Image: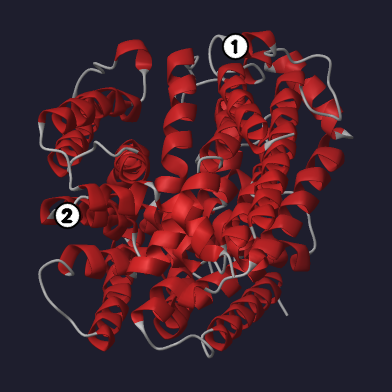
Amino acid sequence: MERWQIIGLIIVAYLGVTLSIGLLSGRKASKSVQGYVAGDRDFGLLVMYFVLGASVFSAFAFLGGPGWAYSRGAAAFYILCYGVLGMTPYFFIGPKAAELGRRRGYVTQAQLICGRFPSRFLSVLIAALTLIAFLPYITLQMRGAGIVIEAVTDGNVPLWAGAAAAYGVVIIYVLFSGVSAVGWTNTFQGFFMLAIAWTLGLYLPIELYGGVGQMFEQIQAERPELLTVPGLTASGDPWSWGGYSSAIIVSAVGLMMWPHLFMKAFTARSDRTLRRTVVLFPTFQLFLIPVFLIGFAGVLYPRSPDSPDFILPFMILNSDLPAIVVGLFCAGALSASMSTGDSLMHAAASVTVEDGLGPFVKLSDQHQRLLIQSFVLITGLVAYFFAINDSSSLVVLLLTSYGLICQLAPPIVAALYWRRATTPGVAAGFAAGSGVAVFFFLTGYFGESLRPFDLHEGVLGLIVHIPTMIIVSLLTKPQPEARQAAFVELHETEHAAATP
Amino acid sequence: MGIRAVRWLTAVYMTAFLLAVTWPGFLLFNRVTPIIFGLPFNLFCIALFIVIGMAVLFLLYRSEQRRAEEER
């Protein structure tokens, strides 16, 4: 049997196991919207940990992370810095959102925001923004899967076929089992990719340089600019401190505001599960370190791949590893791509139906579920179309997605903690903040960058967003006392209610 | 430690974390040598901040949990 066929067989075996886990996991979940979107609010610690961790550990971590370390050096360190900061607020916000979800039947983030600030405009705006941010993200996950399969099979399985096989499996299990499949497959995939990342992250530096420390000493001697923060930009010039620092801030604010992550608050079995997940989450940040080591191992390698993003498969294929190891690596990389892609597709469809259409048409529970399933299929097909065609323009969209997503943070915080916030205030702030972020992104993309101190457009958006929200809220009529209390003072009453 | 003290500790630590990893705070740690556990000094520091952050979050979890039980 030829080498690529052995690798292919391992991939097929991996896809088979994933598919069975995905299909089996949905048997117990109820056939309702709550079952499909929020897993009947019954995820335990293991699944919650991997569902959040694996969704973050995406194809970006497996392909982009090493690519950043390889081409931009210490610039990649920013990816490590925001996890703990971004997760901590969720310790308080998560359980509160979950309690409101249980009481009022929420399954999405926009339902929570619009429960406090009733506005169809806001609901549709959030749904539209989510889709704009998600589509390029899903596309890149698919493309990543196709690229990896094509590379390790020496081109015998082309990109379109590889992406179709991997995401065919994803679509089937998401269609049948909804979020339960996302949770349980992510657990399997999470174990898998962690094992692969650590093994290769330690193996490559030892094999090529004699050890991790020796590797960094040699890089320090030959390419010292790669080892001090803020590292380099994509074009190889020194990156700015403003760009580096504001990237951390935007990512920290935006991290848990990604709808596919925030919505998982509604899937947790209890507050205790949610809080434990927050405590354990930073371990996933530490798992990024071996991934960076793989990228750094490529720095002094005599040959280089076509694009920095291919550094990982490139190193794997050039280090004379046995076919089985290459196959397992490929399965690890597919895990990273699929565990993020499934979560995104599921959330994109849920948000479209619940928040985009929900406020306008009354649908029965059964119809909603059916509609969400159709949108999973539609999202998958659209993303696939972009993935197999040239999608360079989509990469650009992805760059600004954090700038848009972090605009969801002020409405969430206001909904749960600020009594005096009003619907016009939140809507105005949200529109202004997103507008500013888009403006600075577009001017930078088409012409000259107008951003002061090279600050991320998301931070600039927030600088306009927050004062707008506060001022407009204070100028408009306060909300009825009962509504304020129902959301803001929940925490005190919740403890009383929890007493048996 | 009371619940309020632990919440304060968390807020203070997370603020310090933010200041330490962004400009200008990170200038204090932005060196390659000494290499510790095979990692450049700056990367090692970030890893250390994350580990301490987890310890702080664990403390917060313990005290929130204790409070929930006391109220029961």
Which chain is home to disc 2? Answer: A
Residue at 72%, 12% in the rendered image:
B31
Amino acid type of the residue tagged 1 in the rendering: Gly
In this rendered view, identify the residue nearer to me: A89 or A309. A89
Query: Picture coordinates of residue A123 (x, y %)?
Result: 19, 55
Q: Position of residue A263 (x, y in %)?
A: 42, 60
Quadrant of the rendered image containing residue A445: top left
SS at mark 1? helix
Query: How far across and down, in percent of the image, does residue A385 sit?
Result: 29, 65
The chain holding disc 1 is B
Residue occupying the point 68% across, 75% down:
A10
**Any part of residue A379 in sight:** yes
Residue beneath disc 1: B25
Seen from this angle, which residue lies furthest right?
A: A210
Residue type beneath disc 2: Pro
The residue lying at 43 percent from left, 71 percent from top is A38
Left or right: A301 in relation to B19: right
Q: Quadrant of residue A293?
A: top right
Q: Which label is found at residue A162? A: none
> Mark 1 to mark 2: distance in Å?
42 Å
- Give A487 or A89, whichever is nearer the viewer: A487
**Residue A118 numbered tag:** 2
